[in-house]
Image (cartoon, rainbow, N blue to C red):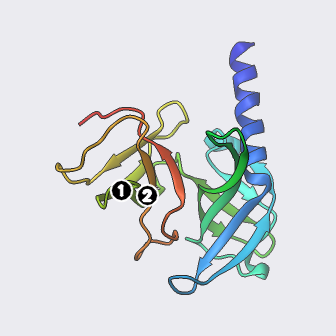
Amino acid sequence: LVDRIKDLEMQLAYVELNKAGLLFDKENDQSFDIETADVIMKDPQTYYNTLVINKGSYRGIKANMPVMAIQKVKKNNGKFERERIVVGKISQTTWMHAKIIPIIDPECTIHVKLNDEEFTGLLKGRGTHQKGLLMTHISKWAKLYQKQEVITSGGKSIFPKGIKIGYISKNIS
């Protein structure tokens, strides 16, 4: 029962996170077309590692587009603010729907950087929420510490620069 409750909580978190999902198509460094969509299905074959949204190619959605969501975050001053976070990327589209590979999937690799330093690396999913994400290809000169913020690096990446991914939980180098 405890496992089932945790599973339901994870599903609810996905729905809440993706309810206000934003899709960005990068035209140039600062210009983006935005399309909102709702998660309408989770692929049971991959234990919810694939999400399906209610927008497809008829709305201009294409494979490899980044997927982000808006999250409410409580700041140190006690006030809530909205911030963009990475969800994953589009893997396939049909006329009416699109599949999302979430950030936790090993097939989803993202160019990232440490928020307080210029060191960049690659972030890859490890298959489940419990396993988290793994940052690789980062300079040995980077000073890594717990709770250090990791953001998208921009550049040639499909994700715009500065979108929050999360925080370092532990250094396993």
Q: Secondary structure at mark 2?
A: strand
Residue 164 in the figure: left or right of residue 73: left
Q: Residue at x 17, y 50 (%)?
A: 141
Return the mark for residue 109: 2
Three-letter code for the amino acid on which mark 1 is drawn? Leu
Three-letter code for the amino acid on which mark 2 is drawn? Thr
Q: Residue at x 64, y 76 (%)?
A: 62
Q: Is residue 43 positioned above or below 158 on the image? A: above
Q: Are marks 1 and 2 in contact (CB under 8 Å)?
A: yes
Q: Where is residue 94 drawn, in percent x and y?
A: 73, 72
Q: Nearer the viewer, mark 1 or mark 2?
A: 1
Return the mark for residue 132: none
Q: Residue at x 66, y 41 (%)?
A: 77
Q: Is residue 4 positioned above or below 137 on the image? A: above
Nearer-the-camera pick, 120 or 126: 120
Q: Where is residue 133 drawn, in percent x and y?
A: 44, 42
Q: Secondary structure at mark 1?
A: strand
Q: Residue furthest front?
A: 77
Q: Where is residue 26 drawn, in percent x and y?
A: 57, 80
Badge 2 crowding class, 10 Å Cα cut-off, few under 14, some 14 to 19, many 20 or more, is some
Return the mark for residue 122: 1
Quarter of the image where the N terminus is located: top right
